[in-house]
Amino acid sequence: MTEIRQLDQLKPGDKGKVVKVSGSGAVHRRILDMGVVPGSEIEVERVAPLGDPVEFKLLGYHLSLRKEESQNIHVEVS
Amino acid sequence: MAVEGAVSNRSAIIDYGRDLEKEIATLEGSISKIEALTARYPARWLAVKLLENDSDVKEKVRAIDGGVEIIRQAETSMAHLRSIFGDEAETVIADRRYGFISGVAKKVLRKPAIDRLTSSDKIDNIVTNRVLGIPIFLISMWLVFQFVACSGPYSDWLDGVLAGPICRWGITIIKLISLDGTWVESLWVDGIIAGFAGVMVFVPLLFFLYFALAILEDCGYMARIAFVMDRLMKAIGLHGKSFLPMIIGFGCTVPAIYATRTMREWKDRIVTAQVASLMSCGARLPVYTLFAAVFFADNPGTFILALYLFGIFWAIVIAKLFRSTVFAGGEKAPFVMELPPYRMPTLKGVLIHVWERGAFFFQKAVTIIMAVSIILFFLLNIPWGVSDMRDSLFGKVSATIAPVLAPMGCGNWEAAGSLLTGFIAKEVVVGTMGEIYVAGAQEEAEVEEPTNFFQDLGEILVGFWDATVDTVKSIVSIIPGVNLMDGEEEEEVTRLVAALRERYTPLQAVAFSVFVLLYIPCMVAVAAFRSEFGTKWALFNAVYLTALGWIVSTLIYQVGLLLGF
């Protein structure tokens, strides 16, 4: 069973497959440029000590995103 | 992982798929008809950028004749693509690019089947840990400052080289052109050499700081600092990357201003630079230490720490204020940042960093230091042959400014004069006070034996070796429980302490120290600010800080008086 969730709802250790990146402007562009595009596998690695930002693992590297940025990323969780 | 074979160049153009390619081709065709565009940009690249809705490119195209028409056409194409894909064209383009990349990667790269926990991950599990992350960061900052403090012997060595051999060589040249005993000699010794020595003592500190930071940067920890501290900086309207410049500000404001270059968003950048000098720099420490020794001898550390915290407090207040007024709005800088794997920094890489930044500071600083030192020299010596500093032009200028400082309890020409010279470098405030209050303190009886060039050279080299030995000892002494250093005390300072105790009340000392903390940064910092953000914002920086200093110190003094201190 799969369901679509916003990336910021996931917990460390959770994995998902990006289905949609909403939003616009420079931030949106930057997220796409870093490889967060539909189809890529993304895993929540850890949360920063003060609760934000969150570190993710994708394409074999580590990416840090604030919650407000990861909200726009919709992932399919199985 | 292993790379197998190379990909041929001929497939370098990415195939964006039939629907996209059709739109790209049409747009490309229209673009090729406009010569002003093709002269500047490759047509295909431009077509892709427009479909990606790149605001920078759009702006540039709009400025060109016929550009508006092209943009309208691109917008029609984007709408058409949206109806096909149900998503923005830019998403689809990024997607195709990554498709191309993974295709190439699949062909040439063989990965181990299972993802192992790399040593980089293991380090991150500790240093960005929810509980340990911040303490580890604080400890690493403490180590950086301990390390920077070890640069002292080199500062002394540089000071000695400037005041000794270099000064003597200059005098020899002056003698050769028979100008000895004239104002030229005095300009050289009391103006140029003295001015240079004042700033040069900071160069080793800067190089040590840059060295430590380059290591943190090259090993990958710097990105983790931004990761750990971002939440805190966001609260005051800044970015995780603002944190580093502010930390550097504790060493010196000049590199802090340059360190803002890592930030993408101009408004974040300038606000960080505007508050950087509120992070109390190393040069202000001698001033605090002096007043702490005079008036808070029981608890000097608390007084100094309070001043540092007061500076941080104002940095937060001002950053928040500026971010919502003068520098409000602007695109919010994203925190979309790669956390690179940890690497062992190479000595060569670190040294290149240190050299680039250090040399940059040096170049910027030299001319302005030279100019201000010469001006100050003439101010101090006009009318010619003046013996009391009070009667010099400098004394008169200070006396004119003094009434302005009266509301904060420092309305005498001595305080005004010290603060004026503080513009050269903050620690000069202490030197000036020494000269004014301790009569003749500057006239050290120097018994000079004639030396030749080779003896001087020998002295320089031996001095450098001694400084290196001392530095290594003090670095080793950072390790808890190891102490190779023996304490030193300067006698001149104690005379100054006595003189200050007579002339200032503790309340005045607090107001004065706070003013030193807040008012105009030193000339080198102002010059750095100007080179990074332009004359207008450098002036803004100098004026707002001085105004803030005056207001806060006056409040402290007046409220203190009312409370009966």
Image (tube, coloured by chain):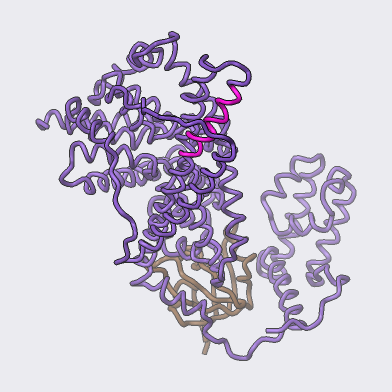
Residue plotted at (46% across, 39% down): B160
User: Can you tell which quarter of the image residue B513 is in?
Assistant: top left
Q: Is residue A72 above or below residue B491?
A: below
User: Can you tell which quarter of the image residue A35 is in?
Assistant: bottom right
Q: Is residue B184 above or below residue B195?
A: above
Colour in which chain A is drawn: brown
Q: Where is residue A15 drawn, in percent x and y?
A: 51, 82
Magenta segment includes B163: yes
The residue nearer to you, when weighing A37 against B216, is B216
The stretch in magenta equals B160-174
The residue nearer to you, when weighing B394 against B279, is B394
Residue plotted at (50% across, 52% down): B465
Q: Where is residue B299 drawn, in percent x and y?
A: 18, 47
Q: Is residue B467 visible?
A: yes
Q: Where is residue B74 drawn, in percent x and y?
A: 76, 55
Q: Is residue B328 visible?
A: no
The residue nearer to you, when weighing B81 against B429, is B429
Residue B440 vs residue B60: left or right?
left
Query: What chain is the purple one?
Result: B
